[in-house]
Amino acid sequence: MVKKIFSIAMYSIRQWVTDPRIISLFVLMSMFVWNDFEVIGDLTGITGIKTNPLIFPFFSSDPVKQLILLAGIVFLFSDAPFINKNQPYIIIRSKRIPWVLGQILYIIMASAIYFLFLMLVSILVLLPHGTFATDGWGKIINTLAQTDVGAQLKLQFGITKEITTFYSPWEAFGFSFLLDWGVACFLGLLLFVINLNFNRMLGLVAGGVILFFDLLVTNALPPTFYHFSPVSLSRLSVLDPMGVSLFPNLTYPFVFFSVSIVILSALLVVSIKKTPIEITSEL
């Protein structure tokens, strides 16, 4: 059964190669990341000082940038439950439970691939100007965190002092990936549940509300509301690693995403037993 589930997930991944919709998403997101990171490369060229290239945690901690990155996730999974002309044969051969477990695994794998790809792009942009041999974050990042040089260069995201203070570059990079992976899985599974039990329009509306709720909390609501905003929990700069404020601590989002993923997966398994699956030849 495990092999069957993995095969179903890999089938969906392989469809990316011939899907213009998915290819366009990855190209556009690559351009989005590349364009914003080039400014830091320009600064290293001016100063002659190489930078640590593990800067993606600052990018994904910016509320607007993270909203756009996760809008890509909503777009990627908006067609859940991923029914196309070949799926009826897969469902008949595999049965419903292995099929839905395969789709859940697909969402988990696709979420990881999406963010690993974009994080790799962010490193490649800076690689000609970067080095992993910096002392901590290095002079470039520390300067951007402690001065207004970024604003002068029109850098489109903030280099926050909170991240440089509490995390090493590899710690921040690792935590950022896990948080992004968690929220992407959460959004993908939530869209799957809503689309399967209701309709895709409602799923898109729910996804949009969750994305923009982070901006509402950031600009208008008290810090306690960050606990109820999945997108906010994926932004490393929001978290309080010391656990001494009203902001979520570092453990909270991992518990939140883990429990949510288990619950949403269980709902999908229950739903697939009684929900009729509408087969269409084209999405």
Image (tube, rainbow, N blue to C red):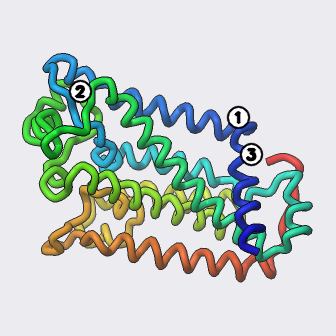
Q: Reading the chain from its start, which is encountered first: label 3 or label 2?
A: 3
Q: Amino acid at mark 1?
A: Pro
With 101 as the anchor, is 58 left or right in this view?
Answer: left
Please tell me whether residue 175 is drawn above or below residue 3 in the rendered image: above
Q: Amino acid at mark 3?
A: Gln
Query: Judging from the image, what secondary structure is the residue with disc 1 in?
Result: helix
43 relative to 220, above or below? above
Badge 1 or badge 3: first in the primary sequence = 3
Q: SS of the residue at dot 3?
A: helix
Q: Between 91 and 75, which is closer to the camera in this rendering?
A: 91
The residues tagged by marks 3 and 2 sit, at their Cα atoms, a distance apart of 39 Å
Tell me, yes or no, whether the two marked residues, 2 and 1, touch with CB atoms within 8 Å: no
What mark, if any, has residue 15 been given in the picture? 3
Which label sits in the foreground, 2 or 1? Answer: 1
- Left or right: 274 with respect to 183? right
Q: Quadrant of the N terminus?
A: bottom right
Q: Position of residue 117 (x, y in %)?
A: 49, 42
The residue tagged 2 is 154
Q: Position of residue 163 (x, y in %)?
A: 19, 53
Q: From the image, tell me which residue sits under label 1.
A: 20
Q: Residues within 10 Å of mark 1 (few under 14, many from 20)?
A: few
State which tag comes first along the sequence, 2 or 1: 1
Q: Nearer the viewer, mark 3 or mark 2?
A: 3
For the point 53% across and 73% down, the residue is 261
